[in-house]
Image (cartoon, helix red, strand yellow):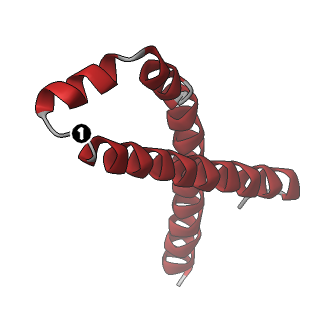
Amino acid sequence: MLNAGQDCQYEVNKTIFCVVVQEYMDGMEFLSSFELQCGTIQSVDRLRQHPSYERFMNKWSLPVYFQIRFVVCVIDLKGVHKSTECALNKLIQR
């Protein structure tokens, strides 16, 4: 079981993760719609090589995203492990 501080941190991490994912998805959807306006593959390539495009892509700190996601997953697994352990202990005590 998580204590109050861990539970609060879990909710904060989960919220941050959800916001980051939504913003990332919105950004990628914007880029996809923008790229669809290009008439050729060469135009898309030129767009992707433009400094503004590269700056936009570099704003996404994917290592931070994955670190937050990892923490959320670990906390979820700890909760599952603890629940399973409690259930097994109850079965053993019968």
Above/below status of 85 relative to 27:
below
The kind of residue tagged 1 is Cys
Q: Position of residue 78 (x, y in %)?
A: 58, 53
Q: Is residue 63 left or right of residue 41?
A: right
Q: Nearer the viewer, residue 77 or 48?
A: 48
Residue name at image x 53 percent, y 44 percent: 69
- Point out residue 62 in the picture as x, y percentages from the top left corner: 49, 30
Quarter of the figure that contains the N terminus: bottom right
Rendered residue at 59%/46% (across/down): 20
Q: Residue furthest front?
A: 39
Tell me which residue sits at (14%, 25%) in the image. 42
Is 5 situated above or below 43? below
Tell me if 72 is positioned left or right of 44 in this view.
right
Q: Nearer the viewer, residue 53 or 58?
A: 53
The answer to whether 4 appears left or right of 76 in the picture is right
Q: Residues within 10 Å of mark 1 (few under 14, many from 20)?
A: some
Disc 1 target residue: 38
Q: Residue furthest bottom?
A: 94
**Residue 86 image offset from top left, x and y in percent:** 59, 69
Residue 48 x/y as whole percent: 32, 24
- Residue lying furthest left in this view? 41
Q: Measuring 32% from the left and 47% from the top, which residue is drawn there?
A: 32
